[in-house]
Amino acid sequence: MSHSPTQEKPTILNPIYLASLSLLLGFALGYSAHRVYSSQNRGESLVRKALQKHFRSPNYHLLNHITLKHGDSTTQIDHILVSCFGVFVIETKNYKGWIFANPKHESWTQVLFKAKFKFQNPIHQNHRHVVAVRELLDFLPQDAIKSVVVFSGDAEFKTDMPSNVFTLPMLINYLNSCTEELLSLNRVQFSVGRIETARMEISGKTDVEHVRALQRRFGNND
């Protein structure tokens, strides 16, 4: 007498197990995002403190974490240093490891413990910020508004550092070397007032709206 082959019963996962797995996955993703955000915050804090120490009023005015409307979206700027010697739009990166950079490429590479990570070319990223500031301060010559990218962490560039990309000590030296007066004190104060009037409120809600705008545009960070 022949026997029909035994059919395997489908595995039914316990709903409590599935819920726990989902919770753990969400926690892991959230923790990873939090680490990146916290790292950037530390980098921005280092840059802010260094700029406040070395560059003071009346010739310099520092604004931090500025969100501006730009077209039908928003753009978020780490720092703007408004001075008699130019308006410096500063993008901060707080990275470790090796950095491979090409100013023309869409992305750069970070190598950390033999793992490779791609990130958006910060020069391209900061270009949008500079355009927004130039549109806002349309009474200034365009070349008075300058793009600056600063790496505040322990990253080591394995390629030539592109123009206007600095470590934090290099940034301080660069700003000290800018001695040609491009703006009067009145223009400096007027520029600061224009930015303060236009900037969105610093809040979690503003950050959420900015992230949603980025996702609608191209799904990555600004």
Image (tube, rainbow, N blue to C red):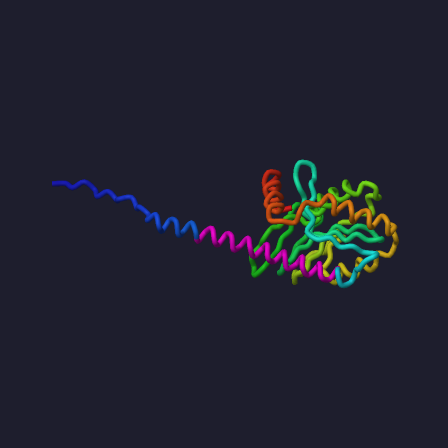
Answer whether residue 108 is magenta in the image: no
Nearest the eye: 70 or 203: 203
Query: Would residue 117 appear left or right of 2 to someone viewing this image?
Result: right
Query: Would residue 132 appear left or right of 220 to someone viewing this image?
Result: right
Outermost residue to the top = 72
Q: Where is residue 123 drawn, in percent x and y? A: 71, 48
Q: Quadrant of the N terminus?
A: top left
Q: Where is residue 32 drawn, in percent x and y? A: 53, 55
Instruction: Name the residue at 59% across, 57% down.
Output: 38
Q: Main secondary structure of the magenta part?
A: helix
Nearest the eye: 101 or 40: 40
Residue 105 makes an appearance in the image = no
The picture quadrant where one finds residue 74 is: top right
Magenta part of the chain: 24-51
Count of number-bearing discs: 0
Answer whether residue 34 is magenta in the image: yes
Nearest the eye: 75 or 95: 75
Residue 56 makes an appearance in the image = yes
Query: Would residue 4 appear left or right of 110 to someone viewing this image?
Result: left
Q: Where is residue 167 drawn, in percent x and y? A: 72, 60
35 is higher (above) or lower (below) than 104: below
Nearest the eye: 29 or 135: 135
Q: Where is residue 183 drawn, in percent x and y? A: 86, 50
152 is higher (above) or lower (below) than 107: below
The picture quadrant where one finds residue 179 is: bottom right
Instruction: Name the residue at 68% across, 52% down.
Output: 101
